[in-house]
Amino acid sequence: MISKFLDFISEYLAHRKGLLPIIGLILIIINLILQFIFPGSILITSNLFLHLGLIVAIFGLMLAWAL
């Protein structure tokens, strides 16, 4: 079951190589916007969306290079 899921994901992302970096950039932009809307929130002070977006973008670039 996991093997079929990984096959499906790899086939899906092989044709959409820029999808994960774009999602990562969107998460980084969301972090920037939320800093001005909710300045005292624990999600914003920890920069969760910034770190998550950076990890997704780097993973997407490495995956696109491999596929």
Image: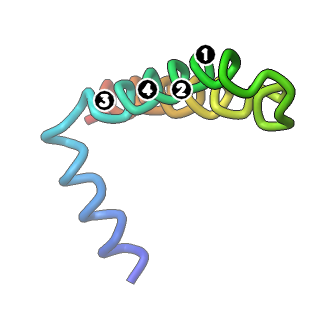
Point out residue 23 in the picture as x, y percentages from the top left corner: 40, 32
Residue underneath mark 4: 26
**Going 64% across and 32% down the picture, which residue do you hit?**
49
Quadrant where the N terminus lies? bottom left
Residue underneath mark 3: 64
* 50 displayed left or right of 60: right
Point out residue 9 in the picture as x, y percentages from the top left corner: 30, 57
- Residue type at mark 1 is Leu
Residue underneath mark 1: 32
* CA–CA distance in space, label 4 to label 2: 6 Å
**Mark nearer the viewer, 3 or 1:** 1
Residue underneath mark 2: 30
* CA–CA distance in space, label 2 to label 1: 5 Å
Q: Check if mark 4's residue and mark 2's residue have beta carbons within 8 Å.
A: yes
* CA–CA distance in space, label 3 to label 1: 26 Å
Disc number placed over residue 10 in the picture, else none: none
Of the numbered discs 1 and 4, the one sitting upstream in the chain is 4
* CA–CA distance in space, label 2 to label 3: 23 Å
- Residue type at mark 3 is Ala
How packed mark 4 is, by other alpha carbons closer than 10 Å (few <14, some 14-19, many 20 or more), is some
Q: Check if mark 2's residue and mark 1's residue have beta carbons within 8 Å.
A: yes
- Against 16, residue 58 (above or below) is above
State the count of labels: 4
